[in-house]
Amino acid sequence: MNYDVKGNLKKVLADLPQGVRLVAISKYHPNEYIEAAYEEGQRIFGESHEQELRHKVDTLPKDIYWHFIGHLQSNKVKYIAPYISMIEAVDSLKLLKEIDRQAAKNERVIDVLLELHIAEEETKYGLTPDACRELLADGAWRDLKHVRICGLMMMASYVEDERQIRSEFQIAKSLFDELKTRYFADEPSFCERSWGMSHDYHIAVEEGSSMVRVGTTIFGPRIY
Ligand SMILES: *Cc1c(COP(=O)(O)O)cnc(C)c1O
């Protein structure tokens, strides 16, 4: 292992204000990297491919909380439903319904975040703020007893301009506040604002993130 995972992890944790949690994004990194972070006490890891995640779940300690952070196809939900701790990137009612169905089969409730699309890049998945409002206004989600919507997730544009990144986080935060007031005022579990990655987590925590998703800064570049 030619990367100081433990040292990097400590530095990132030291940067996070109290109450902001770290999801260590371990996709494409081998088990030994995850084990190093685990030895430092890290328990939440994020992955974006079902098969890679399955292998890691089978071979790593059982008290890890796994977050699915990638785009999830409906036909893959059944594979992760037995064990996934949170599905972060839900961007359609169809996917939400399928998660509910598979969670019910496993007699559990799965925590999810709605993925917002605010960034200008067109390739990214996610709901526009209006699509997100519509999904909740529609009300069908209230019948889904095996999913729990815990907040929002988003990726800011991958740009140098700090003001643009900051303003995208602000849009996400204000939508979170709006939805919280309108739909989840009585639900303390609706509390997650998952934004901030390696290049922008310092800005994200200033703009109301409750959970950052950091990979490269901890584990080094990914080898695809
Ligand atoms: C890969 C990934 C991350 C981590 O990105 P880094 O730049 O390596 O910190 C965070 N969020 C999502 C959705 C990702 O796919």
Image (cartoon, rainbow, N blue to C red):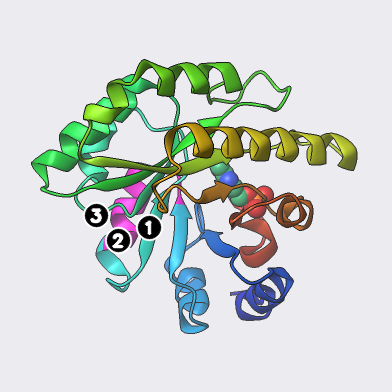
- Number of numbered tags placed on the structure image: 3
What kind of residue is marked 1? Answer: Trp
Which residue is labeled 3 in the image? 83
Question: Which quadrant of the figure has residue 149?
Answer: top left
> Which residue is painted at 74% across and 34% down in the image?
168
Give x and y (percent) for residue 161. 90, 38
- In x, y percent, where is residue 218? 64, 66
Query: Which label sits in the foreground, 2 or 1?
Result: 1
Q: Is residue 163 magenta?
A: no
Dot 2 corresponds to which residue?
57
Dot 2 or dot 1, earlier in sequence: 2
Within 10 Å of disc 3 (Cα), the crowding (few <14, some 14-19, many 20+) is some
Q: Where is 75 relative to 60, above or below?
A: above
Q: Residue at x 30, y 27 (%)?
A: 141
Name the amino acid, label 2. Val
Does the magenta-highlighted stretch encompass residue 49? yes
**Badge 2 vs badge 3, beta-carbon distance below 8 Å:** yes
Dominant secondary structure of the residues highlighted in magenta in the image: helix
**N-terminal-most mark, 1 or 3:** 1
Residue underneath mark 1? 66
Q: Are marks 1 and 3 in contact (CB under 8 Å)?
A: yes
Q: Which residues are magenta?
A: 47-57
